[in-house]
Amino acid sequence: MVISQTGYSPSFKRPAEIMRMRRKRARSDAGVFSSPSGQSSADSPGQSGSSPACVRPFSPGPLFNTQNRAGGGIKRRNPFANIENTFTQITAEPLDQPPLSFKSYQICVFSMSRIDPNTLCTEYPADWSLKTRLLFTSPLTLSWAEQPKAQEEALGLSQHCRAQFSSLPHSVQSLVYWQHPSLPWLSMFPRINAERSFTGKSTPWAQDATLQQSLMREWSVSLSSLYSLLKSRLCPYFYLCSYQFTALFRAAGLGGSDNITALISPTTRGFREAMKAEGIEFSLPLVEERKKSRECCDLNEDADCQTHDDEDGSFSWLKEMGVQDKIKKPDGITIQLRKEGHAVSLDHKPESVVCVEGSHTFTLINFLINCKSVVAAAGSQAGLPPTLLAPVAFRGATMHTLKGRSVNVKSQVGSTYQNVSSLEITGPILPSCLHTITTLLRPAQKGNFSAALYSHTPTAVMNIQTNKQQVTGGSVDLSGCGLHPSSIQQLQQPSGLGKTALTHISMKNYSYTWKN
């Protein structure tokens, strides 16, 4: 990255004729202004004979002193003269420069909540939420990305399958994802609150137990294949989308963690209890973060704890007051419900997200394969296994490409109209797909474009930091995971978006700004 400091010189030019007249006057009046030591004003830098007495010209330098006033002259304040009034600007790297360093990337990512408008980044933070729609706009045409030629499509698909990245990803290569199950007449994503999209469609397995078992058997094989690829770092991540929750599995080295991690959101108390019963250790990152932010229990928490202690005890304080027979004591069930009230209140909320790390993710896979609640028992999605999505091929998967459509429109800017080209991309857009698409548009649109991002709401919480131990950078080899090296570099860093997702990305002069 190139660091440059903006200077203090005024951004105006004096006419050449005036400058010549001032130089001529300065030579003729050289002896008028002098310092107490007898030196002429010409010996002092930055002085001009054309300046009136007691006034310093608009440039840094000592004041004029006149013979009739030894106390010094009058300053004309130059707001640009002090270095404190200047700012440091980070400029974008040319395309032929090496990628953004890890340290510089950290500066951009971790200070994004208070980004200086004069600070520009050549990368935006990783966003682990699934996108349903992208809308790119650019002053240059985007129609080239809509329908590739047959040979270009074949080359892009071939390079994707072979994970060949000799140059920037081709347009088709950037749009590829793998899915199981794949039913042409059904949209398999999103699955949460998607009953309307399934209503009225043919679902022959809904009342056929044998067919349901066959679907689940094939789905189990695909899920096991994905986890094996993930553990071997041949697959960077994958998503499991059920009708109730979405699970994200990430390989070791991604998201700032040196272990395999799994995030599930949203969850219910019943689901979490079932995980505990299977011996799966998990954490509630947002709940724990809220607890850690408090230095100690506040007065309300102390009062609650005291109340629970009293309810669990023998109510001896009632006996001391002599009203033990007049007060109805809460039974054990009431006490238990009060204790569990907080846990139940998390259900279906972002705070209910759970994190599973390390070897417990393998137990989680077995749990999901055998858990009946991952498949709807009634409704339009009854008997249909969850959708598996990944950026690389796995057993039983079908290759799909995102849908793109470009439109050229005129947009009003002030009192004039300018030609603006837009590109809409729809489908289950994975984090690496978003990054390769923006990497492709960067040189194609000459470093100027903007994008509106539409996230699948339940997955926005996937951007939380969950790891207990962070990677120092490059300690885990992910070169064989099938992603472009620049995408790997981005996804290795902790997101820093919290439980929010990116909503806008803008590139201007090869530098990013974003909103979340």
Image (spheres, helix red, strand yellow):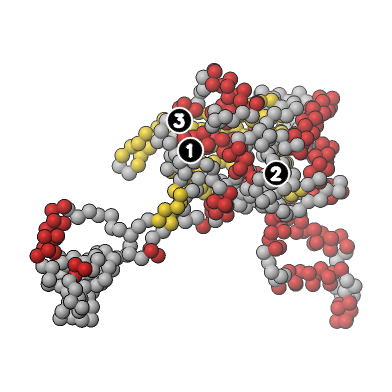
Of the two numbered discs 1 and 3 in the rendering, the one whose residue sits closer to the viewer: 1
Find residue 478 and report its horizontal and vertical position in percent.
68, 39
SS class, disc 2: loop
Q: Mark 1 and mark 3: span between their CA atoms?
A: 23 Å
Label 3 element class:
loop
Q: Earlier in the sequence, mark 2 or mark 3?
A: 3
Q: Which residue is mark 3?
A: 142
**Residue at the image position 88 percent from the left and 81 percent from the top:** 320
- The amino acid marked with disc number 2 is Val
* Image coordinates for residue 385, horizontal then vertical, percent: 76, 32
Position of 516 with respect to 340 (left or right) is left
Give the Cα distance between marks 1 and 2: 27 Å
Amino acid on which the number 3 mark rests in the picture = Leu
Q: Residue at horizontal 43%, vertical 36%? A: 446
Q: Earlier in the sequence, mark 1 or mark 3?
A: 1
Identity, as a three-letter code, of the amino acid under mark 1? Asp
Q: Residue 466, can we see it? A: no
Farthest residue in the left direction? 28
Q: Residue 476 got which mark?
A: 2
The residue sitting at the top extreme is 150
- Residue 169 vertical position relative to residue 314 in the rendered view, above or below: above
Examine the rendering and report whether any part of residue 154 can be seen: yes
> Nearer the viewer's eye, disc 2 or disc 3?
2
- Which residue does the numbered mark 1 point to in the structure image? 96
Query: Eyeballing the image, is 340 above or below 308?
Result: above
